[in-house]
């Protein structure tokens, strides 16, 4: 079954992206109006995040999100055959020189991004980096091995490298001991598991547990941290700007890096909320106020 699915994806991704967007438009009608895929999850998240908006405004965000969600699916599989030139045309890394400057200083970098815009295309940063100083995308292995293999391959198409999150620390130690520089890309808006609810913040009007692993690594290795802010310019076109979170992490207070990232991400979402992944169960954990 997997090979049939893979073969189907392989074939349709030879179609022009404009044609794939027609499939996206059809998928939106089915997913949103007929199936109702996670519609209630998205609706609840949007309502709690924007209580001051009218119901009409929130429903508009909801519809626009699901339309964009379908675009993300076709754009992600389109990466299977996209050329390097087209990828860099569609994903513009507008100030990548700030990362080159860190390489010149002998520093690797940690890049924090989110499920916002086309986060899958962010791996194309590899095309703007020296081959001996690559980008490593950090990921969590999926339970479905076949789907995990497909996502792994798609994320490697732009010559980027992947590291399973449980192997990251060992890999960073190995690279540092060998004197090798690299970029490490983290999707940092995910929900911690129940055993790692170490830090909570107010995010989008709600008590929110936050992953702190990037901050821990930054302080340990003294690697600069940047927020990779992705902005959608128009359908199929994005830009990515690298905003400093901490250039001297060893001088920061505990959770300072994590908090600044969350503040930057909130500003991004508030500008164009429909491009964030609202169907994710981001607030499934509730804070135990009695322990504070």
Image (tube, rainbow, N blue to C red):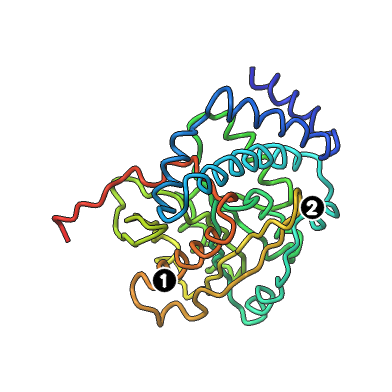
- Left or right: 65 with respect to 38? right
Q: Are marks 1 and 2 in contact (CB under 8 Å)?
A: no
Q: Mark 1 vs mark 2: give the one in front.
A: 2
| Cα separation between marks 1 and 2 | 34 Å
Q: Residue at x 67, y 63 (%)?
A: 240
x, y percent for residue 161: 64, 52
Q: Residue at x 72, y 42 (%)?
A: 75
Secondary structure type for disc 2 = helix
Picture quadrant of residue 202: bottom left
Outermost residue, left side:
290
Q: Please report whichever mark, 1 or 2, sits nearer to the chain's N-terminal start.
A: 2
Position of residue 56 relative to residue 204, above or below, is above
The crowding category of the residue bearing disc 1, from other C-alpha atoms within 10 Å (few below 14, some 14 to 19, many at least 20), is few
| Residue found at x 71% / y 61% | 239
**Residue 256 at x, y = what percent?**
39, 73
Residue carrying label 1:
220
Local crowd size for mark 2, using a 10 Å CA cut-off: few (<14), some (14–19), many (≥20): some
- Residue 115 is left or right of residue 77, and the answer is left
Residue shown at the point (49%, 33%) measured from the top left: 39
Q: Quadrant of the C terminus?
A: bottom left
Q: Secondary structure at mark 1?
A: helix
- Relative side of 270 to 81, left or right: left
- Which disc, if any, is residue 87? 2
Residue 161's place in the image compared with 266, above or below, is above
The quadrant of the rendering that contains the N terminus is top right
Q: Quick one: 138 or 228, which is closer to the camera?
A: 228
**Viewer-nearest residue: 263 or 122:** 263
Residue 19 location, quadrant: top right
């Amino acid at each position: 079954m997997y090979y049939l699915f893979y073969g189907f994806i392989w074939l349709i991704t030879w179609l022009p992206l404009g044609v794939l967007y027609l499939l996206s438009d059809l998928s939106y009608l089915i997913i949103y109006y007929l199936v109702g895929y996670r519609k209630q999850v998205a609706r609840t998240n949007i309502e709690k995040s924007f209580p001051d908006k009218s119901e009409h405004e929130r429903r508009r965000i909801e519809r626009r999100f699901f339309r964009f969600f379908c675009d993300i699916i076709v754009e992600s599989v389109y990466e299977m055959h996209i050329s390097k030139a087209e990828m860099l045309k569609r994903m513009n890394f507008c100030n990548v020189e700030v990362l080159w400057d860190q390489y010149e200083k002998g520093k690797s970098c940690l890049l924090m991004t989110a499920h916002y815009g086309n986060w899958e295309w962010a791996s194309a940063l590899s095309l703007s980096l020296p081959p001996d100083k690559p980008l490593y995308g950090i990921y969590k292995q999926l339970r479905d091995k076949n789907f995990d293999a497909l996502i792994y391959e798609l994320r490697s198409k732009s010559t980027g490298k992947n590291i399973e999150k449980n192997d990251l620390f060992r890999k960073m130690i190995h690279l540092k001991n060998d004197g090798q520089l690299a970029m490490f890309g983290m999707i940092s808006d995910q929900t911690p598991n129940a055993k790692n609810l170490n830090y909570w913040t107010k995010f989008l009007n709600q008590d929110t547990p936050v992953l702190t692993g990037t901050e821990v690594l930054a302080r340990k290795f003294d690697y600069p941290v940047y927020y990779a802010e992705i902005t959608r310019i128009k359908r199929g076109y994005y830009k990515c700007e690298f905003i400093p979170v901490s250039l001297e992490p060893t001088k920061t207070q505990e959770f300072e890096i994590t908090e600044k990232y969350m503040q930057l991400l909130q500003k991004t979402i508030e500008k164009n909320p429909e491009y964030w992944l609202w169907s994710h169960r981001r607030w499934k954990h509730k804070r135990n106020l009695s322990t504070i």
